[in-house]
Image: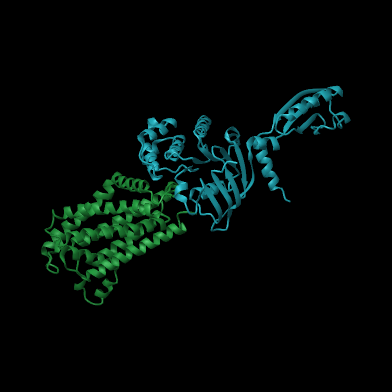
Chain colours: A cyan, B green
Amino acid sequence: MQEPILSIAGLSKVYSGGVKALDDVDLEIRKGEIFALLGPNGAGKTTLIGAVCGLVRPSGGVITAFGHNLKNDWRSARARIGLVPQELSTDMFETVERAVSYSRGLFGHAPDKARIHEILRSLSLYEKRSSQIRELSGGMKRRVLIAKALAHEPELLFLDEPTAGVDVELRKDMWEQISALRERGTTIILTTHYIEEAEEMADRVGIIRGGKILMVDDKAAMMKRLGRTEAVLQLAEPLSELPPSIAAFPLELSADGRELCFRGGDGTGKGRQQVADLTKALIAAGIDFTGIDIRESSLEDIFVSLLTEQEEPA
Amino acid sequence: MIAFNIRGTWSIYKREVMRSLRTAFQSILSPVLTTSLYFIVFGTVIGARMEPVDGVAYGAFIIPGLLMLTLLGETTSNSSFGIYMPRFTGTIYELLSAPVGVAETLIGFVGAAATKGLILAAIILVTATFFVDYEIKYPLFAALYIMLIAASFSLFGFILGIWADGFEKLGIIPLLILTPLTFLGGTFYSIDDLPEPWNSVALANPIAFLVSGLRWTFYGTSDVPIALSLGLTLGFLAVCTAIIAFIFKTGWRLRE
């Protein structure tokens, strides 16, 4: 198996007020992947990123990036890591180009105007390169933060809520940028509130809550394992109970017997086949229906379901 | 393994110097104007009626004190703002996540603040020639001592910028402590001329040792032995460096 680009073992963080933000977190990130870290507010996503990037002092555990232990050999590791923070924190009076060039130098790289211009072009910032950052829109400022993070050509890039507060068009644009980065070989870890963002881009998904990692899996495997097909059939005549011929299907009657609700499958499309079989069985049993609504569960359904399970008392 | 990030250091230094130039009116012209007014009032107008102090014309006598007044205030303020502003705006995330440690950070921020202090000192000395006649007895020693003071108080300002949790605290130390202590530290008079107990009280003021030390490099006369002034300055530099090393080691007010 390929050696992970980032390895986190037993990471914990207790803030001075006693809040346990991270609780014995183990996580491995593979080279070249897009990893989405999902979790509600206060779950520990930003603390986890901060611990890797040097903004937060871990209370315990070991973080290894590119084979360097971050406690002892942090310079070598940090030189290869980039961070786009959640907050729009920039030097408002600096020009775009100077701010991005500063970031490149800060991370130990020689000045390279052509490279900086290339980054600015790729983020549609080139025309604004001489503008002060305070003159830019919120979306443009976020692009500047991405440009600053890319200035030193990091191999591992953290994006903390990269599309928070940006409009739909810009969000899609940023997704394209992130995909382009992955194609160039950059490993990306992103946190997001937009589940569709993770669903669209991530190779693997981790779910964190209360400082604990609840689950880490390939997105496709997670969908397959936890996904469901849900179908609602509107019946022509209400049923008081399920006939024996369809009792083997995972069905429930609702709306006073006027609706038949199917919940089954496994996220691979198997459920759709079962719904087709169900319709045949209904016709064979002489049960008429007037409509069918069918949908596959999304990553969001899985996310909500996992969190709900955690909330339920033992 | 990266031992020292020289490009990172240069980037911080360059940016901080550029920041000062961006606010040149406030950071350079304003202190020069203030000091010029001191020279006009105390050096030319009042100084013409004053007796020489320790054999030095009064207008020339006050130059080291006035220089110290500007140097302490400006190096402390510039350095404290340099590190406080990134903390305030949140841009410090970039510095903390970069491959730069305490050495690079200090050389960058403190070096830039000290550079600005030295530029100011040079401008003030040139400005002084328009108002009073003076000659520096030990110019090399004076330059080294000014550099030492600029570096020490830039370090002090750096600590202040990390300690402060609001703009008010940033201003308190330079305005309410450094400026009064410099005024009372023999800027306008020789501490030797003070009667007891005020002479002993004045010698409890550490700034008096610095003013005295700088005056010795200018005119060869001082209120306290130069070795004592130099020792105190070096001691202050060492204490500030140790505190900053502690701050970076523990992450106090920098890393959560």
Pick the residue in front: B131 or A225. A225
Please state the horizontal and vertical placement of residue B181, each as a whole percent of the image: 29, 65
In-image side of B87 versus A238 (left or right): left
Please state the horizontal and vertical placement of residue A311, each as a whole percent of the image: 69, 47
Please state the horizontal and vertical placement of residue B37, each as a whole percent of the image: 19, 55
Q: Can residue A221 be seen?
A: yes
Q: In which quarter of the image is residue B176?
A: bottom left
> Could you tell me how many numbered marks the image carries?
0
Picture residue at 31% right of the left edge, 51% below the top: B112
Query: Is residue A194 positioned above or below A291 on the image?
Result: below
Query: Is residue A257 positioned above or below A41 on the image?
Result: above
Picture residue at 24% right of the left edge, 49% below the top: B29
Which residue extends farthest right?
A244
Picture residue at 41% right of the left edge, 53% below the top: B101
In-image side of A243 versus B91 (left or right): right
In-image side of A252 versus A201 (left or right): right
Q: Can residue B184 be seen?
A: no
